[in-house]
Image (tube, rainbow, N blue to C red):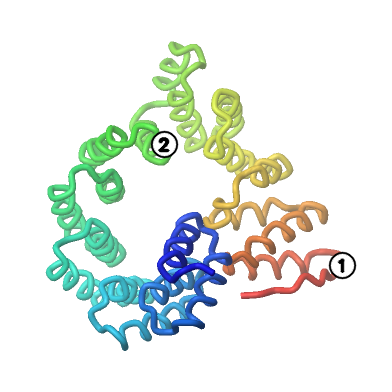
Amino acid sequence: MHSLNDTFTIARNLLRKKEYSEAEAILSEALNAEPANLPLMGLLAEVFFKTGRFKEAEQMNSSILAINPSDYFALQRKGDLLAREKKFDEAIEIFENLLSTGGGNPFLYRRIARAYQLQKNFEKAIDIIQKAIAKYPDKSDLHYQAFVLYRDTGMYDEAMQAISEAVQLEPYNELYRSAKLSLRAENESAENLQEAAELTGDSDPGMLKILARKLKKEGKIEKAIEIFKKVVALEDSDFARKELAFAYYHHKDFAKAFALFMSLGDDAFREAPFVASIVASAKTPEEKQALVERMARLAAAGNTSLWGKIKKLRRELPETHSDEESS
């Protein structure tokens, strides 16, 4: 039998790997033996939060704060729960108090900036992120958040500088590289991008992505698909296949879109736009049944937000299937 310290380490690692069901089982068993263990209670509250079981997360978090009202991580989680309920002022107050008493934390700056952003107070959000970057210049995710804020407020030069800093810190981060390429594409003509792609001889996937996205944005979907196919041939990654799949989807070539969507990893099913698109692209009973089976497995493993889509698909099937639902 594991010691409680070992249990904490094992459960934390499972949580980091998004193996939520396994983490919950280990934590529940350990808490039966020691029900007031705050670190284990905190991990279980985080499992509930990550799997969308917010009421259970709030109940567990409240139990932690009843034992220790100054528990740092429980207070941070309380702020996250309040922000999710759009109680942004209350969430910001908690995060700012933690900043002032806890010596600073880049994640708190991000949370505060995000809350201001959701309130459409972009000036304050940018100010918070700038302060965070001044204090933590090597945190690439802060530069990325600055990029999003600058981009959404039309500050192109600042956005390009911010995303360039993020790429410099993490040159192989596909999200950052893609964001930089997309920003360039928004400010270049398709003709110039076509010339640049021709100069590279169709060997530079980055330039081809810029061109394909520009073509797609201009409604030239067939041309975009041809370019995206070249990208996939050069780098057969989930990211590249997802872009090609969405291009097929917008071109109403649903069979090809569905096949590509289904080839992606399970993490894609945590993205609401992806789930909506793959459900809409499943047209045949066979496709719908295959999708139901995959999403039911993921829902049973903790992605409970999928159950609504699963019920919808089951109603569209010619027969009723008896898979048990759980939450």
Q: Which mark is residue 319?
A: 1
Say which residue appears at 67% left-offset and 46% top-offset. Answer: 262
Q: Position of residue 146 (x, y in %)?
A: 25, 48
Classify the position of the C terminus by image quarter. Answer: bottom right
Classify the position of the N terminus by image quarter. Answer: bottom right
Q: Farthest residue to the right: give it.
A: 319
Three-letter code for the amino acid on which mark 2 is drawn = Ser
Q: Position of residue 6 (x, y in %)?
A: 44, 64
Disc 1 from disc 2: Cα separation: 42 Å
Left or right of 8, for residue 156: left
Q: Is residue 247 above or below residue 310?
A: above
Q: Nearer the viewer, residue 95 or 72?
A: 72
Mark sitting earlier along the chain (1/2): 2
Q: Position of residue 33 (x, y in %)?
A: 49, 82
Image quadrant of residue 228?
A: top right
Q: Nearer the viewer, residue 14 or 130?
A: 14
Q: Position of residue 80 (x, y in %)?
A: 34, 71
Dot 1: within a 10 Å radius of its alpha carbon, few (fewer than 14), some, or many (20 or more) residues? few
Q: Nearer the viewer, residue 193 or 62?
A: 62
Q: Which mark is residue 40?
A: none
Element on which disc 1 rests = loop
Say which residue appears at 50% left-offset and 54% top-offset. Answer: 17
User: Mark 1 and 2 residues: CB-CB less than 8 Å, in contact?
Assistant: no
Q: Is residue 127 above or below residue 195?
A: below
Three-letter code for the amino acid on which mark 1 is drawn = Glu
Say which residue appears at 61% left-offset and 53% top-offset. Answer: 277
Residue receiving disc 2: 178
Element on which disc 2 rests = helix
Image quadrant of residue 90?
A: bottom left
Q: Is residue 210 above or below residue 162?
A: above
Dot 2: within a 10 Å radius of its alpha carbon, few (fewer than 14), some, or many (20 or more) residues? some
